[in-house]
Amino acid sequence: MSKKSYPRLILASSSRYRLAQLANIGLQLPGISPSIDETPRDTEAPEALACRLAQSKAEQIAADYPDAVVIGGDQVAAVTDATGKLHTLGKPGNLPNAIEQLTLCSGNTVTFYTALSLVHNAKHATLTECETVKVTFKKLTEAQIERYLLSEQPYDCAGSFKAEGAGVLLFDRIESRDPNTLIGLPVMLLRDMLADWQIDLLDLTLRH
């Protein structure tokens, strides 16, 4: 039986986390890092921000690879503080910002919005969706926060932790249909989105 032909897949990211997630399911994809402005717009909701950035990343790379299906992804976290103010948490970038983020998260429930966008320019097709995860953090001391951050240095992770590492010990509860989502790439959502374009992700992974 001949194998079904699929378009080439490209990940619009050089994130070692997302590439590792794909490799873990048997899919080796090229990762190409886009360069976009990730500044949130005024009053932009966290889910809308994640979707916009994921699509912008995919569109930028797809412009150079029109025959490929380009996968863009982005993750934004949001938490409400004791005064009722909503805070959007992106990548902290450094220790002081990470301390501020984890202090906000401590003892609170944080919603993570992980968006995926597929762009196939040859078909003039775009599909963008978002998966959410709710994480309730344990009440953390200042010393625990600083020691954790100095240990794992998760400054390139929204929310300032690595769920695939010791960061999971900061949590009291996780609510999600797909544990991959928290790391940065909701694999089950990717499977479902590709299926909408008649691309069978399981079939692809079992070929390798």
Image (cartoon, rainbow, N blue to C red):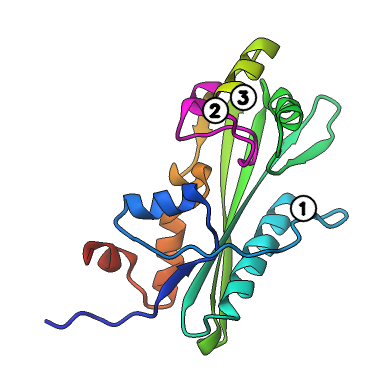
State the residue in front, 44 or 2: 2
Q: Give, as a single range, the part of the protein colored magenta.
A: 152-170
Q: Residue at x 48, y 62 (%)?
A: 31
When asked about the image quadrant of residue 28, the answer is bottom left
Q: Which amino acid does label 3 sit on?
A: Leu
Give above or below for 128 relative to 169. Answer: below
Residues under numbered marks 2 and 3 in contact, where contact means CB atoms less than 8 Å apart: yes
Query: Is residue 178 among what the camera can see?
Result: no
Q: How far apart are marks 1 and 3 (CA)?
A: 27 Å
Q: How far apart are marks 2 and 3 (CA)?
A: 5 Å
Residue 157 highlighted magenta (yes or no): yes
**Residue 152 shows which numbered tag?**
2
* Residue 150 shown left or right of residue 20 in the figure: right
Query: Is residue 67 among what the camera can see?
Result: yes
* Image quadrant containing the N terminus: bottom left
For label 1, count other residues whose C-alpha is less than 10 Å away and answer few (under 14), some (14-19) or many (20+): some
Q: Residue at x 67, y 56 (%)?
A: 50
* Image quadrant containing the C terminus: bottom left
Q: Distance between the residues labelled 1 and 2?
A: 29 Å
State the residue in front, 196 or 170: 170
Q: Which amino acid does label 1 sit on?
A: Ala
Secondary structure of the residue carrying tag 2 is helix
Residue 14 in the image, given as x and y percentages of width and height: 53, 57
**Residue 6 shows which numbered tag?**
none
Q: Residue at x 50, y 22 (%)?
A: 169
Residue 36 in the image, given as x and y percentages of width and height: 71, 63
* Residue 98 shown left or right of residue 202 in the figure: right
> Which residue is the site of mark 3?
149
**Residue 45 shows which numbered tag?**
1
* Residue 141 shown left or right of residue 193 in the figure: right
Residue depth check, mark 1 versus mark 3: number of the one nearer the observer: 3
